[in-house]
Image (tube, grey):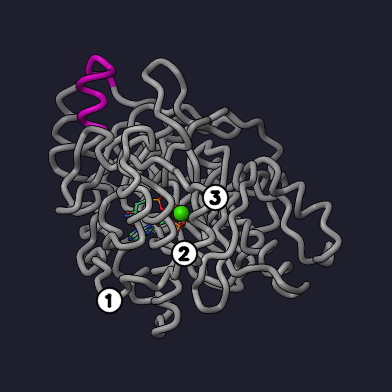
Amino acid sequence: MSELQLSTRTKASLRQPREACSFSIDRENNTQFDDQCLSYYYFPEPMLDREIDLSGGYKDFIEKDESEPQHLNHFLRALINYEKTQCDGSKIKGDIVTFRGVMTKLLCLPYNSSEDIDLNLIAFDGQIFIEEDHQLTQSKKRVMNERDKLMTYWGYKFEAISTLPKPWSEATREEIYDRPKNTVNNIEQYISIVRTGVGNVKLALAGEVDAVTDYKPEKPEDPLPHYVELKTSKVIRDEKDARNFERKIMKAWAQSFLLGVRKIIYGFRDDNGVLRSLEEYKTEELPILVRDSKISNSKYKWNGNDAVSFYASAVEWIKQSVGTQENVAWRLQYTKNDSKLVLYQLQGNEASEVLQTMLLPEFVEWRKSL
Ligand code: 0WD
Ligand code: CA
């Protein structure tokens, strides 16, 4: 068993993320090797005057079925396709292969220690693959009441009313202004796979991208500057709201920073879910905004550089501890309010379960054929 104290810091340089490829998850939960689920952000000012109710269509919300584990399946299918068609059959570079959401948790951990983390890790073909343990994550999920569910819906609804499935120049007036009537689903996703790194550790991260602000450029131009993260938050009326907002934006910053998404657009809504205003932030500005704010006591502020220094130690520690030995399954665990992360080898049934289910058989076969 290996431990990493949350107080550990490593000064490390960062690599600018670059997109390797992208893929879509369609409404039937199939992996599609194209950008069919890419959305285009477009929100004309006059639409705010319509006082859009983000609760609209809540009863028709089509929700992703989370009862069965998805593992890294979509991601690995997309990697096979990428390595076959764009890398002449060589594997994607990277020491660690995982979803961005997994790394967001580690990056935020020094400032958000109120939730457990349960990850499964295995080394295969010289790379470390990491997933959330589905069963543990599901069973520890906070039970959402009706209000929580509605507020989650507001986020998806905001995405649905502020984006189009095609550039606005190709959309009709109706397609733009009738968006509040469209049914919302959280199954369809557009996912970018980026190569990035910190210190000596290279990562291949897959993360959902909400939209492009204008268009997605053709290769070899970098699409990352065109991407935008969409969020909703409560309108800020007093200091308490402002403090909450400053605390909450750490996650938005971390998510966007990890993938190299430069822009975050917030839709501010009132307590009844009516959209009141929009605000655009540069990802890189957020840590500065919090640092310079007079609202929060500096004792409670998050610090981006400090979080990155912890993240650098964490990924280096993972790379060193897990190494390259195959047929071993690991658990990376954090227990809320603890001062350390622990990493240990799984045994018996737990180990066999992870070894048998984590990597898609066709992916293992593909890599073995190289
Ligand atoms: O270990 C695994 N099997 C993991 C799978 C770990 C982390 C994520 N995933 C899946 C997610 O379920 C999602 O389908 O990968 C996809 C996207 O990964 P991500 O970008 O790494 O996820 P994250 O950064 O945690 O979330 C990004 C967005 C969310 O936006 P907000 O603004 O709310 O942070 O992905 C969406 C959501 O819009 N999202 C989901 N959508 C449907 N069902 C889910 C979900 N369970 N989780 C996140
Ligand atoms: Ca979002």
Task: Give the SS element for disc 3.
Answer: helix
Quadrant for residue 256, please give it: top right
Task: Give the SS element for disc 2.
Answer: strand
Spot occupied by residue 230 in the image (x, y as percentages of width and height): 49, 52
Quadrant of the frame with the C terminus: top left
Quadrant for residue 237, please give it: bottom right
Spot occupied by residue 229 in the image (x, y as percentages of width and height): 50, 47
- Taking the image in four quarters, ligand 1 sits in the one at bottom left
Report whether 110 appears left or right of 252.
Answer: right
Residue identifier under label 2: 117
Mark 1 / mark 2, whichever is N-terminal: 1
Q: Residue furthest bottom?
A: 145
Report whether 222 appears left or right of 164.
Answer: right
Q: Which residues are magenta?
A: 79-90
Alpha carbons under labels 3 and 1: distance apart: 27 Å
For the residues labelled 3 and 1, say whether their Cβ atoms are less than 8 Å apart. Answer: no
Mark 3 / mark 2, whichever is N-terminal: 3
Please tell me which residue is depicted at 37% across the width and 68% down the height of the picture: 137
Tell me the mark number nearer the camera, choosing from 3 and 2: 3
Please tell me which residue is depicted at 76% across the width and 50% down the height of the picture: 289
Alpha carbons under labels 3 and 2: distance apart: 41 Å
Residue identifier under label 1: 59
Tell me the number on the disc at residue 45: 3
Q: Is mark 3 within 8 Å of ligand 2?
A: no
Q: Amino acid at mark 1?
A: Lys
